[in-house]
Image (spheres, rainbow, N blue to C red):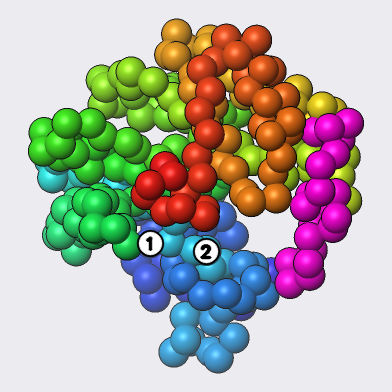
Amino acid sequence: ERNYNDEQLARLTKMRRLDIDPTRVEMGWIMDFCAQSLRNIIIGMGGRMDGFTMQSKFAIAVSSELMAMLSIVRDLADMRERMNNITVAFDKRGNPVTTGDLEVGGAMTAWMRNTINPTLMCTVEYQPVMVHAGPFANIAVGQSSIIADRIGLKMFDYHVTESGFGADIGFEKFWNVKCRYSGLKPHVSVLTTTIRALKMHGGGPKVVAGLPLPDSYAKEDLGLLEKGIPNMVHHINIIRTSGIKPVVCINSFHTDTKDEIAMVRKAAEAAGARCAVSTHWADGGDGA
């Protein structure tokens, strides 16, 4: 329900030309704030000075369309073009109303113009890192930016880019979205796994944040590990369908045993992947 009629809406906001349906405004508010109660809210409860009463929402920055756009734009002109095509709402006939209809694409581009520049940072061992866009593949494209990749490829001998989450979502979006837009094709895809994660996929005890790990994850359990390995094999097969060579990186912890690592290595190689063990958790860059 709403506290105004169509005539009042047209007179007060001059929105008759677009005929926006106030109950179908898709663009909400973006703010990185840990408050899930703000995901779905009612606004405009203070009368006309506070706007119209309608349902609205808050979302985190990485889930916004602007963040998804930032990861795939090639330059400022590309950003300007995409800024005009964001769906803000729907009209009463069910047609989309875009930022271009509202004539705000230019202003949004001007506001975002500096965001296309990646941030150059460094690791604790002073290796250069390009930090750009938000790799959250469950809610957006989930990739670091094309611009950062192109800069990295020009400046360094090799470039490693992150694809959020596993091969079943992050790599799929990397291969089918980012690579198509960028025209870039990687030489290799690294699938990172841990003995602990494979045990969990094998039906291990639930891990609760703030509590010690159950003993199954800190002690050798080849039976539990064997049950979880098919999950890794499935991710390997997804990568292989693209024609890219997969490499399994075992992110090893001090609790992992030689037999457990050998079991994972054997399964990875049998599935068509090369395998390497990383001990950077304990040894830093020397173990990577």
Quick one: 201 or 109, which is closer to the camera? 201
Residue beneath label 2, please? Answer: 59
Q: Is residue 50 above or below residue 161?
A: below
Query: Looking at the image, which residue is at 33% across and 21% down?
Result: 186
Residue 49: x %, y % from top left: 44, 89
Q: Is residue 52 left or right of residue 271?
A: left
Q: Secondary structure at mark 1?
A: loop
Residue 110: x %, y % from top left: 14, 60
Q: Secondary structure at mark 2?
A: strand
Residue beneath label 1, please? Answer: 15
Quick one: 114 or 123, which is closer to the camera? 123
Crowd rating for badge 1 (residues with CA inside 10 Å; few <14, some 14–19, many 20+): some
Q: Is residue 249 above or below residue 164?
A: above
Query: Alpha-carbon distance for marks 2 and 1?
Result: 26 Å
Q: Quadrant of the N terminus?
A: bottom right
Residue range in magenta is 206-225
Query: Residue 210: within the magenta?
Result: yes
Quick one: 39 or 280, which is closer to the camera? 280
**Disc 2 to disc 1: CB gap under 8 Å:** no
Query: Looking at the image, which residue is at 26% across and 22% down?
Result: 184
Q: Amino acid at mark 2?
A: Ala
Q: Amino acid at mark 1?
A: Met
The first of marks 2 and 1 along the sequence is 1
